[in-house]
């Protein structure tokens, strides 16, 4: 099921929230630098899948491997360390620390990893610039509109050059006009730096910026590993049972 070149892969994931199943036998893999869209209707299990893949949750059954390391059996402290160093996270709200400026928020993962303040500041400023919020670097989050706070959160997810960024509906707090720009900035930055992105969303815009998509319905994969942009499952294609991560076709947009 997993391809040998996958940086992160999971096999046979099952997860229950308080006895109610959220993931049922889900297998998936993502390569270095690949943008994978996880699509499906509200409540289909997208967040639970990202949580399991990123080591935030441990699956009830199944395996998650990152760069040869079994996340599903790793003791919690080691898992946390690995997550901090190698993963970035963008949620559907910016969740910045209010007492830190935008650049300090973006630099936080680097500072926590022991990087010197000057180097951390330089990296944070570079990412804020790429996300068009360089001018807000010295502002406190409370002084910024939601759309700019979310860009700062994206910069924070990327500034420490993680191997994988998990983005769970990252455009949810943005206006329509801002959504495409933030998605493109996130995916372009990731492609340039060979950062894999696992991007959850329930709209077609999410799938369009990805190299590949998978679709969940009621916790199960219903796609056959379509290239991004090809409708499947809840988006009008045929539901054809559980599928593996095969069927990849690179179709990167020039962003
Ligand atoms: N903490 C929780 N406790 C109980 N049930 C939960 C919890 N989190 C999620 N669920 C349930 O698990 C299922 C999958 O939820 P999940 O959030 O993973 O889906 P989703 O596709 O990300 O939804 P959305 O698009 O609304 O974020 C849903 O039925 C949801 O109600």
Image (tube, grey):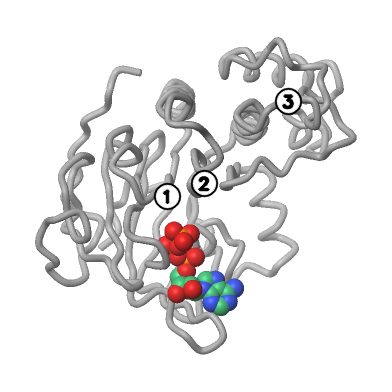
- Label annotation for residue 166: 2
Q: Residue 24 appears at what percent x and percent y?
A: 35, 77
Binning the other alpha carbons within 10 Å of mark 2 as few (below 14), some (14 to 19) or many (20 upward) gives many
Q: Which residue is mark 1?
A: 200
Q: Residue 121 appears at what percent x and percent y?
A: 79, 18
Q: CA distance from mark 1 to mark 2?
A: 8 Å
Q: CA distance from mark 3 to mark 2?
A: 24 Å
Q: Which residue is mark 3?
A: 144
Q: Residue 226 appears at what percent x and percent y?
A: 17, 48
Binning the other alpha carbons within 10 Å of mark 1 as few (below 14), some (14 to 19) or many (20 upward) gives many
Foreground mark, 3 or 1, reads: 3
Taking depth in this image into account, of 144 and 158 the one nearest to the observer is 144
| Callout 1: SS | strand
**Residue 141 figure quarter:** top right
Q: CA distance from mark 3 to mark 1?
A: 25 Å
Circles 1, 2 touching at the beta carbon (< 8 Å):
yes
Q: Is residue 204 left or right of residue 47?
A: left
Q: Residue at x 37, y 67 (%)?
A: 44
């Amino acid at each position: 099921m997993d391809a040998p070149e996958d940086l992160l892969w999971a096999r046979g994931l099952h997860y229950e929230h308080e006895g109610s199943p959220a993931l049922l036998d889900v297998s998936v893999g993502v390569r270095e630098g690949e943008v994978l869209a996880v699509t499906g209707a509200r409540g289909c299990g997208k967040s639970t899948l990202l949580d399991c893949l990123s080591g935030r949750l441990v699956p009830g059954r199944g395996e998650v491997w990152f760069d040869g390391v079994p996340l599903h059996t790793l003791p919690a402290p080691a898992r946390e360390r690995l997550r901090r160093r190698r993963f970035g996270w963008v949620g559907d709200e910016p969740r910045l620390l209010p007492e830190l400026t935008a650049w300090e928020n973006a630099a936080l993962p680097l500072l926590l990893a022991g990087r010197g303040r000057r180097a951390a500041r330089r990296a944070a400023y570079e990412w804020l610039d790429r996300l068009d919020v360089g001018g807000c670097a010295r502002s406190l989050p409370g002084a910024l509109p939601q759309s700019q706070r979310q860009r700062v959160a994206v910069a924070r997810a990327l500034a420490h050059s993680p191997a994988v960024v998990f983005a769970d509906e990252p455009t949810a707090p943005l206006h329509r006009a801002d959504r495409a720009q933030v998605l493109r900035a996130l995916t372009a930055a990731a492609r340039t730096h060979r950062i894999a992105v696992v991007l959850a969303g329930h709209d077609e815009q999410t799938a369009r910026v990805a190299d590949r998509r998978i679709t969940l319905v009621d916790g199960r994969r219903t796609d056959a590993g379509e290239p991004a942009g090809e409708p499947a499952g809840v988006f009008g294609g045929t539901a054809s049972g559980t599928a593996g991560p095969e069927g990849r076709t690179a179709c990167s947009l020039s962003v």
